[in-house]
Image (spheres, helix red, strand yellow):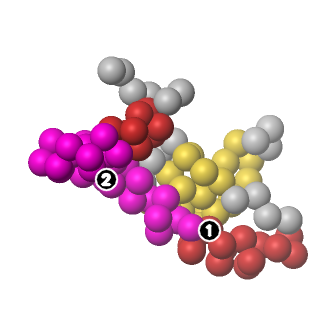
Amino acid sequence: MSRRRTPGPWRIDLTANVDCGYSRTSPAIVGSNGVVVLISDPSEGEYSEALDLLSDDARMIVCAPELLEFVEEVVRFLPEGLQDKADALLARASRP
């Protein structure tokens, strides 16, 4: 199955250059190829709150590619009932 995903590892970039019709910097999660995976778009007054939220969520999000790769590797060693559950989760992660 061919997957279209931004390659990992992903990283947190608190001052990513983003082109959204105009150039700006914003906190974001960026793939190893420089593609922005997720951007936080705070208004001026919410910038520090957005950084806090991004950093709390980002630790989990940036691990996603490696967690997926790990599950794909270990699923074959799981007991049958757990393999079914892991296969269902992998299928959800692979849906377009």
Relative to 80, is 50 on the left or the right? right
Residue located 47% across and 64% down the image: 60
Please say whether residue 69 is visible from this viewpoint: no
Q: Kindly identify which numbered label has been placed on residue 78.
A: none
Residue located 12% across and 48% down the image: 77
Q: Secondary structure at mark 1?
A: helix
Q: Nearer the viewer, residue 74 or 68?
A: 74
Whole-Å distance between the Cαs marked 1 and 2? 19 Å
Point out residue 45 in the picture as x, y percentages from the top left corner: 87, 75
Relative to 35, is 43 on the left or the right? right
The image shows residue 58, relative to residue 89, as above or below, that is below
Point out residue 81 in the picture as x, y percentages from the top left corner: 26, 46
**Residue flagged by tag 1: what amino acid is it?**
Leu
Task: Give the extent of the magenta segment.
Answer: 57-86
Classify the position of the N terminus by image quarter. Answer: top left
Point out residue 73 in the picture as x, y percentages from the top left corner: 18, 45
Q: Nearer the viewer, residue 60 or 8?
A: 60
> For residue 43: magenta?
no
Q: Secondary structure at mark 2?
A: helix
Q: Kindly identify which numbered label has been placed on residue 66.
A: 2
